[in-house]
Amino acid sequence: MVTGQAADTGATTRELERMMAEFGDIPAEAVIKQDILRQGLAFSPDALRVASGYKPKDYFIFTFDLVPVAEMAEHAAFRAPEEIRMTGGPYDLRRTVVSTRVAPDSPYLVELRAGKLVLTCEGAFLADLEFPPIPAYYSQTLSSGRKISQIAPAIEWGYLVYLTVYRLCQYWGRDEECRFCDLNENFRQQRANGREYTAVKEIDDIVEAMTLINEHDTVSQAYTVTGGSITKKLDGMREGEFYARFAEAIESRFPGRWIPKAVVQALPVDEVQMLHDAGYRIYHPNYEVWDAKLFSWICPGKDRYVGRDEWVKRILDAAEIFGPTHVIPNFVGGVEMAKPHGFTDIDQAISSTAEGLEFFMSHGVVPRFTTWCPEPTSNLGRQEGPPLEYFVKLLRAWRDTFEKHKLPVPPGYGKPGVGNAEFSVSAFMDVIRTP
């Protein structure tokens, strides 16, 4: 690692190096990855021209951008790559996959230098870059005329097929929608900008897409079925019934071909059993934020319809059906520091979240986290997220609790460890220590 650069380096570089020096047990790759996710990526025009030959952002569920589509150059919105993969540079980075969050004012700029893609930070060379290849099956068109990339996009460098089968959420408006979430607004943005963006995907399209993927692709190893919450019914079905059908249709044709994952609400036991019986092997009932008061503020719909304590109980109930290691709830790392009601002290925020990690991991359940991106059309948008120090301390808290309980690597997330991890929206898989 290179440290102690010139005194005239910018604030971002100085903070990176301060974190690397203070938290030497956290890989430099994870520190940089979290800061990129926190601040986003800018792209030079030349880099965007190169990106047109690679897999673009598919906006598969949320925008994960720091500016609205209407406020960025059209080509940046639709031609930026889904992810980047960094190597080398002054810190001798091992291969690190990072999700693209478009932010034209970011200190992290993707550009071309001497014909090569590079990442710079405040103008200084930081890493060599790769963009993800376009999956072989993306050239296929479904019999319905829809693009396969719209029905079954790939993320995590091709490891995961992401099936957002319901692109709206029945938690409506500021009194029900999770305050960090732009799922409904993303749907409106994409449709307003002329993109094909199906609200409810047909099972026939999903099955045909997975058939083509099975024929043409050897990279994908898992699929996620997800979408917005269903508070009443959709097409006459409860949430568990609605989402169960998709795994049942896929697994009846391709048993064992992929690791099937469901990302839906914390459901009653009978609906969780439906998901398991349909063929899902991993269940993600995301709890978003641990603190009870913040849960009621940040997730008002979930609090009203289910309740925080019942949500937690349902996660543990699901572990009886799927097995603890196959229940992997997500929390939104950093949202507990959201203004105006969140924690203002980093260590207090970490202490709260660490309490939740200890609770779940002591039961054999391993939460994962995504990095909060204050998407501007969400209720909590247009504010800065937590500082880098928060995320580095969160990584340490997650890893130390994980190791304390001697838990296995979460299944369905690809390879663990620095230089290997494919999960792109946080560095939790990067900090798992491997032999």
Image (tube, grey):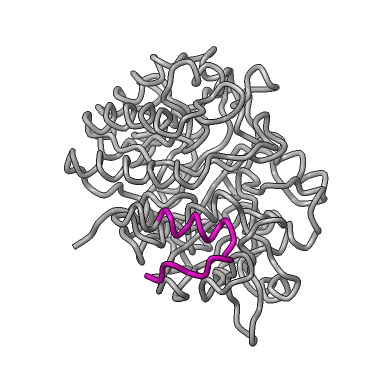
Left/right of residue 13 with respect to residue 409 in the rendered view:
right
Q: Residue at the location (66% across, 17% down)? A: 175
Residue 400, horizontal then vertical, whole percent: 25, 43
Inspect the magenta stretch and tell me whether residue 410 lies in it: no
Q: Nearer the viewer, residue 190 or 270?
A: 190
User: Would residue 248 be seen by someone viewing this image from the given angle?
Assistant: no
How many badges with numbers are in the image? 0
Q: Is residue 166 left or right of residue 218?
A: right
Q: Quadrant of the N terminus?
A: bottom left
Give the side of residue 336 with respect to residue 42, left or right: left
Image quadrant in which the C terminus is located: bottom left
In x, y percent, where is residue 263? 46, 37
Does 363 sit above or below residue 113? above
At horizontal 57% and vertical 21% (from top left) the residue drawn is 341
The percent position of residue 190, horizontal first and vertical second, equals 75, 46
In the rendered view, does 172 fall on the left or right side of 71?
left
Looking at the rendering, the stretch of residues picked out in magenta corresponds to 1-19
From what the image shows, is residue 80 above or below residue 357? Answer: below
Name, please, the residue furthest toward the front.
Answer: 7
Question: Would you identify the image quadrant in which residue 9 lies?
Answer: bottom right
Q: Quadrant of residue 111?
A: bottom right
From the viewer's side, name the closer residue of 305 and 111: 111
Residue at 61 percent of width and 44 percent of height:
61
Eyeballing the image, is 291 above or below 21?
above
Residue 108 in which image quadrant: bottom right
Q: Residue at x 50, y 63 (%)?
A: 213
Residue 57 visible somewhere in the drawing: yes
